Image (cartoon, helix red, strand yellow):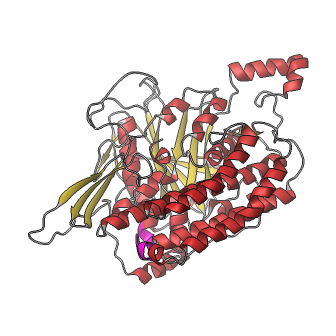
Amino acid sequence: MNELETHVSSLDAEHELEMPGPGDLSREPETAPGARRMVLNMGPQHPSTHGVLRVLLELDGETILRARPEIGYLHTGIEKECEVKKWQQVTPLTDRVDYLSNLINNLCYALGVEKLLQLEVPEMAQWMRVMLSELTRLNSHLVWLGTHALDMGAMSMFFYCFREREEILKIFEMFSGQRMMTSYIRVGGLALEPPRGWQKVVAEFISTFDSKVDEYEELLNANPIWMQRTKGVGIVPLETLIDLGVTGPVLRAAGLKIDERKDNPYSSYEKFDFEVPTYTDNDVYARFLVRMDEMRQSTRIVKQALDGMPAGAWIAKAPGIILPDREQMKTQMEALIYHFKIVTEGFRVPAGEVFQVVESPRGQLGYYIVSNGTSKPHRLFMRTPSFANLQSIPAMLEGHLLADSIASMGSIDLVLGDVDR
Amino acid sequence: MLPETLTEHPVVSPLNERFPGAIVESKFALGEVSLFIDPERIIEVCRALKEDFAFEQLSGVTGVDWWPQEPRFEIVYQLHSISRNIRLRLKARISENDALDSVTSVWRGANWYEREVFDLFGVTFRNHPDLERIMMPVDWEGHPLRKDYPVHGNRYSYADE
């Protein structure tokens, strides 16, 4: 028994739950003799499933006996589409997979391709990527908090969170011209030079954000209705969660300190000082606390990035791969030829494969990129966190009340684009 | 049998000693280890990796289609050891009509990933508790991620009407 196993079993012992048998995701429920089961379709069109998720529920009164999620309603074949696009054309497709954390998807893809190309990214671009990723994490957690509270009836939270989120979207619009699907992090660095005056806007936003998080905590943390609805709800043993492939805040709320930014730092994350919040209760309330703390840690990182941002180039110099400077392209012949070739034919990536993992707001996001030496990817597999997290739904829902299912599903922070691709 | 760089690897050489012949080929590139496993022995290797080598979590299962090369499919298992902070990639090369053993008895999280591979590539997994289409509608014909399946087209399913 190694350290991790003893740690996990000590955490599970606190909750005294047993793990169902191997192989199946939901066990055969025991019904009282004479009880009737009702099949309820929590259909793809539902305000609380956070996207087009269908959950088939077998109910005995208010108790869920069996829950079977069905996905595929948002499947758009992004992975197949990536196989016919040039390497640089894939970037806007990655934005749309997890549509609440766009820049983090871009980052994962860019890091993977840069690894295959053995390309060095300048330091300023790396720090900007970290800052933008953390702003994206704030964006995602704000949407999660607003919609989760809305599902439970706390409607005003939704408006407060979206008021803050509006500021972040304005920042993204300033950088890239787009509020959501920014495609701002490209292979080699950033898409455009950071706009003049960005420091002032970001500083203004981040200086007030901590007090806003205080506001949210004041509204919810000690709220008796919130606590009654979320404490003790959605508990699944940590060993089961790990076995199911769940990652991210759900594991951190169960006591496991796991964060890809600390374990395998990428893009200069090792230079930043931040903590990974963990709690041991493993219920919806603990997951809520973990994400609130993560928002505070993200604010810390953005402040550090603002203060210590190095000067330098915002994109790498690699003539056949990265587009040349626009002004040079207009006056120098080689730059013009490179520009033409990159845009029409695309650049080639040496044959090989890489599995690049980053920490998305939902868990570990991994891109498995296979190159066959041409200008198009051979295969791009997106190991999205929500797909694995969704597998824990039957374990979390079965045997509990219908109303608790809304709380549990909200606490996993699902994004159906992530699940279905 | 193993390349120079992998003879000292903490997982690969003990695994090779324990299951001689199971590792058909191995690669170490860009800091990542890929092991090609004999498809018939995938489940015993996976079980050993989980129980004895501390690969607690399966990050994902996917496929790569190398049509028209034979064997056509490469089923890729991405493993993650949380306690040792190591990642490992296992691959099984199979042809179109071969079947693989399902690893859901080792990691429950493999369930949906194998369903996805079945749906999008057409690879059957033996002993899978629930092998049916997951992304495409239940009555769909064809396996979209194969290389001989068109990227654009017009097909409609009335299954969910």
Residue A68 visible within the image: yes
Q: Quadrant of the C terminus of chain B?
A: top left
In this rendered view, identify the residue nearer to me: A175 or A317: A175
User: Residue placed at 83% from the left, 51% from the top?
Assistant: A199
Q: Please name the residue shown 42% across and 65% down the image.
A: A407
The answer to whether A243 appears left or right of A255 in the picture is left
Q: Tell which residue pokes out farthest to the left in this image.
A: A34
> For residue A321, what is the image quadrant?
top right
| A190, above or below A251, in the image | above
Q: Nearer the viewer, residue A337 or A396?
A: A396
Determine if the magenta segment contains residue B149.
Answer: no
Start and end of the magenta stretch?
Answer: A228-240
Q: Toward the viewer: A330 or B67? A: A330
* Total residue callouts: 0
On screen, residue A199 versus residue B120, left or right, reads right
Task: Judge whether B70 appears above or below A299 on screen.
Answer: above
Indicate whether A113 appears above or below A26: above
Instruction: Give coordinates of residue A178: x percent, y percent.
Output: 67, 38
* Magenta highlight on residue A236: yes
At 59% across and 51% down in the image, what residue appears? Answer: B33
Q: Position of residue A46 (x, y in %)?
A: 37, 50
Q: What is the x, y in percent for residue A229?
A: 42, 72
**Residue A420 in the figure: left or right of residue B159:** right
Q: Position of residue A136 (x, y in %)?
A: 65, 52
Q: Residue at x 60, y 58 (%)?
A: A161
Q: Is residue B57 visible?
A: no
Q: Quadrant of residue B93?
A: top left
